[in-house]
Image: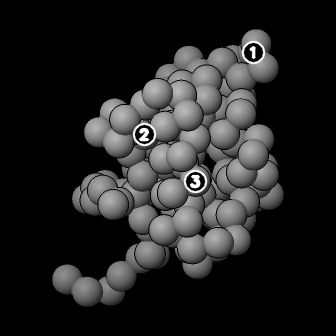
Amino acid sequence: MFTGDRNLAEGLTSEDFTKPGIPMKTFIEKYLNRGEVKRVVFVPANTRAIAILHPGAVIDGKPARDQSVVVEYSQNSQQFWADVRKAEAELGIGLSQGVQIDLYQGMTTFR
């Protein structure tokens, strides 16, 4: 369901975990449906997802100001995955071609 990435935090900033986000509907309409999302990191502890944008992403006809966008999302990771995949399916994008979604549980002290 979620893919793993040993460099999961790559592309994320500390600000991504604290700045206000946009609604899920806005994310789907302005970012996901326009093909500007490279990957998404869902952070359940912070009730948000962080979408990493493609280089040169264009939002509302202008170059994106940031490399990422925070999406407020209070439901669980399975529902987030389902909502993203549903939006992609409506665009004719199959599961194997969908945006990469990673689950970020936070830093660990295990070695």
- Return the residue found at the far left: 111
Taking the spot 46% from the left edge, 27% from the top edge, the residue there is 92
The kind of residue tagged 1 is Lys
Q: Residue at x 55, y 65 (%)?
A: 79
The secondary element bearing badge 3 is classed as: helix
Considering only order in the chain, which callout, 1 or 3, is on the residue closer to the N terminus? 1
Which sits earlier in the primary sequence, circle 2 or circle 3? 3
Asked if labels 1 and 3 touch by Cβ distance under 8 angstroms, the answer is no
Query: Would you say 74 lies left or right of 42 here?
Result: right
Read off the residue under disc 1. Answer: 62
Quadrant containing the N terminus in the rendered view: bottom left
Q: Residue farthest to the top? A: 61
Q: CA distance from mark 1 to mark 2?
A: 22 Å
Q: Quadrant of the C terminus?
A: bottom left
Query: Dot 1, how many residues are within 10 Å of its Cα: few (below 14), some (14-19), or many (20+)?
Result: few
Above or below for 40 versus 90: below
Residue at the disc numbered 3 = 83
SS type, badge 2? loop
Asked whether 73 or 63 is in front, the reply is 73
Residue 67 higher or lower than 80, as above or below: above
Residue at numbered disc 2: 99
Say what amino acid the circle numbered 3 marks: Asp
Pick whichever of labels 1 and 2 is earlier in the sequence. Answer: 1
The amino acid marked with disc number 2 is: Val
